[in-house]
Image (spheres, rainbow, N blue to C red):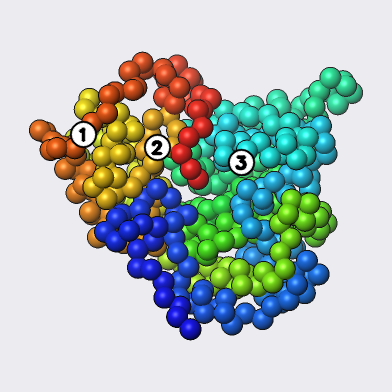
C-alpha cells in the first residue's frame, strides 16, 4: 500500500506556507498507524485505539479522563455546554479564538452568554476585570450568572504568547473562590509547554477542562482532545453526540493522534527556532516592525510600514512570489512555522520579503490602492487604550 506523504505541506512545490500550522500533513508513521489500528465502534465505547489515545492524552495533561472530538471548535463548545447552564455567562477574552473564530456556538447551541473582556498585549485578561465579571449579585434576577472563565494559551491573536504559570494560578484561585469552572483552550498547549520549559500537565493542572489540537503543529490530519474530570468528560461526550461528533471506527483518526503525542511534541522546539530565525530576518528589513516583538512560540507577527503597500497588498504580492502569509487582526501579518517549513524555507521567505521592500522595488508587481489611511480604522491598534487591545474586526484564520 502506498503511504506517500507529499513533500511540501499545504501548497504547490516551491511555495513557503506560513499562513498556519494547520497546513501540516500527516507523517508516514501516522499513515502506517492508521492502516494498522485495531478498530471498534467508538459510540459504543468499543474502539480500542480511541481508548488508548484518550488515556494517553489524559495522562499527559494530568486529568482523569479525555474525549476525542473532530475539531478544536467542537472541543471548546462541548466544554462550555458541559459546564454552563442555559442563560449563564462564559467570561472570555475579546481576542480569544472561542470568541472571534467559533461562530458564536455557545450562544447558538447552549443559550450561553459570552462576556468578552479586553486582552492585554501579553494575552492575559486583567484579574480585576475577571473578578468584576464574577462578582455579580446572585440574588438579583436581572443578571446572567457566571459559570465559566475561558483562557487561551498560547494566545493566538496576542502574538502567540504563552500565559505564565503564575497568571494561570491566579485566575484558577479566582474561579475557585467564586465557584465557577476554568476552561483552557490549549490548541497549541504543547507549544506553550515548550516555550515555558515545563510539562503540559503543569499548565493544564490549573484548569478544570483543557483542549488540545492534534492537527496543528503536531501534524495529525484531524482531531482534538478535551480532558477533565470523569463527570465533566461524561457530560461532554453527550454534548459531542448532540453536535454530531460521535464517530464510529474513529481509531484511524486516533492512531494518528497517538503518533502526534508520542513522536511530534519534541520537535516543536525546531519550529520555535525557525520562528526566531524568521523574526531576526524580518527585523533586518526596511519597512518591517515586529509586533509585539520577538516570538516565544511558532508565531511571528509583524507590520509593514512602507507607503507602497497596504497590509493586504503586501500579502498578495508575497503570495505571487510563493510566500503565503495572512493578516490576523489589527493590520498585523502572522507567519507560522511548522514541520512543513524548514530553515531554508524561512530564509527564502525573508529573501522574498526583502525583494518586495528594497528601495526601488518591487519590480513589475502591481500594487493595490492603499486602503488603510485613517489611524484608528477598524483592525488597527490605536493609542490611548491603557495597554489593552480594542475590539477586533474578525479576519484571517486560526
Q: Which residue is mark 2?
A: 327
In terms of image quadrants, where is residue 230? bottom right
What residue is drawn where x is 61% and y is 72%? 252
Splitting the image into 4 quarters, where does residue 15 fall? Answer: bottom left
Q: Relative to 394, is 287 on the left or the right?
A: left
Residue on which the image places disc 1:
366
Above or below residue 10? Residue 251 is below
Which residue: 51% across, 75% down?
A: 31
Q: Which residue is mark 3?
A: 102
Q: Are marks 1 and 3 in contact (CB under 8 Å)?
A: no
Cα–Cα gap, marks 1 and 3: 35 Å
Query: Which marked residue is nearer to the observer: mark 1 or mark 3?
Result: 1
Element on which disc 3 rests = loop
* Labelled pair 2, 1 in contact (Cβ < 8 Å): no
Q: Is residue 350 or residue 111 the one in the foreground?
A: 111
User: Residue 84's spot in the image, x, y percent?
Assistant: 79, 40
Secondary structure beneath label 1: loop
Q: Position of residue 171 (x, y in %)?
A: 66, 39
Q: Residue at x 45, y 78 (%)?
A: 3
Taking depth in this image into account, of 242 and 18 the one nearest to the observer is: 242
Amino acid at each position: 500500500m502506498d503511504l506517500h506523504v507529499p513533500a511540501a505541506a499545504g501548497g504547490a512545490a516551491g511555495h513557503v506556507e506560513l499562513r498556519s500550522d494547520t497546513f501540516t500533513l500527516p507523517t508516514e508513521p501516522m499513515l502506517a498507524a492508521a492502516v494498522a489500528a485495531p478498530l471498534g465502534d467508538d459510540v459504543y465505547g468499543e474502539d480500542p485505539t480511541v481508548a488508548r489515545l484518550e488515556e494517553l492524552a489524559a495522562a499527559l495533561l494530568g486529568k482523569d479522563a479525555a474525549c476525542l472530538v473532530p475539531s478544536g471548535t467542537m472541543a471548546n463548545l462541548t466544554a462550555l455546554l458541559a459546564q454552563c447552564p442555559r442563560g449563564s455567562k462564559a467570561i472570555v477574552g475579546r481576542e480569544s479564538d472561542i470568541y472571534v473564530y467559533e461562530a458564536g456556538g455557545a450562544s447558538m447551541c447552549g443559550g450561553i452568554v459570552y462576556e468578552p473582556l479586553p486582552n492585554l498585549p501579553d494575552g492575559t485578561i486583567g484579574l480585576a476585570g475577571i473578578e468584576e465579571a464574577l462578582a455579580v449579585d446572585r440574588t438579583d434576577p436581572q443578571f446572567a450568572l457566571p459559570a465559566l472563565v475561558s483562557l487561551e494559551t498560547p494566545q493566538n491573536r496576542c502574538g502567540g504568547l504563552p500565559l505564565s504559570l503564575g497568571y494561570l494560578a491566579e485566575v484558577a484561585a479566582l474561579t475557585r473562590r467564586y465557584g465557577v469552572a476554568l476552561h483552557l483552550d490549549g490548541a497549541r498547549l504543547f507549544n506553550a509547554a515548550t516555550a515555558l520549559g515545563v510539562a503540559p500537565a503543569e499548565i493544564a493542572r490549573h484548569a478544570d477542562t483543557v483542549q488540545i489540537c492534534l492537527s496543528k503543529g503536531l501534524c495529525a490530519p484531524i482531531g482534538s482532545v478535551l480532558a477533565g474530570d470523569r463527570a465533566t468528560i461524561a457530560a461532554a461526550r453527550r454534548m459531542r453526540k448532540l453536535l454530531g461528533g460521535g464517530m464510529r471506527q474513529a481509531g484511524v483518526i486516533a492512531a494518528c493522534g497517538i503518533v502526534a503525542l508520542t513522536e511530534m511534541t519534541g520537535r516543536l522546539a525546531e519550529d520555535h527556532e525557525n520562528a526566531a530565525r524568521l523574526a531576526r530576518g524580518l527585523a533586518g528589513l526596511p519597512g518591517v516592525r515586529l509586533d509585539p516583538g520577538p516570538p516565544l512560540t511558532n508565531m511571528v507577527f509583524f507590520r509593514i510600514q512602507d507607503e507602497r503597500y497596504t497590509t493586504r497588498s503586501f500579502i498578495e504580492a508575497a503570495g505571487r512570489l510563493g510566500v503565503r502569509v495572512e493578516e490576523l487582526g489589527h493590520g498585523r501579518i502572522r507567519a507560522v512555522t511548522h514541520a512543513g517549513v524548514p530553515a531554508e524555507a524561512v530564509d527564502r521567505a525573508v529573501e522574498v520579503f526583502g525583494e518586495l521592500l528594497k528601495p526601488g522595488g518591487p519590480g513589475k508587481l502591481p500594487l493595490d490602492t492603499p486602503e488603510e489611511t485613517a489611524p484608528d480604522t477598524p483592525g488597527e491598534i490605536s493609542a490611548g487604550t491603557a495597554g489593552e487591545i480594542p475590539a477586533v474586526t474578525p479576519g484571517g484564520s486560526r
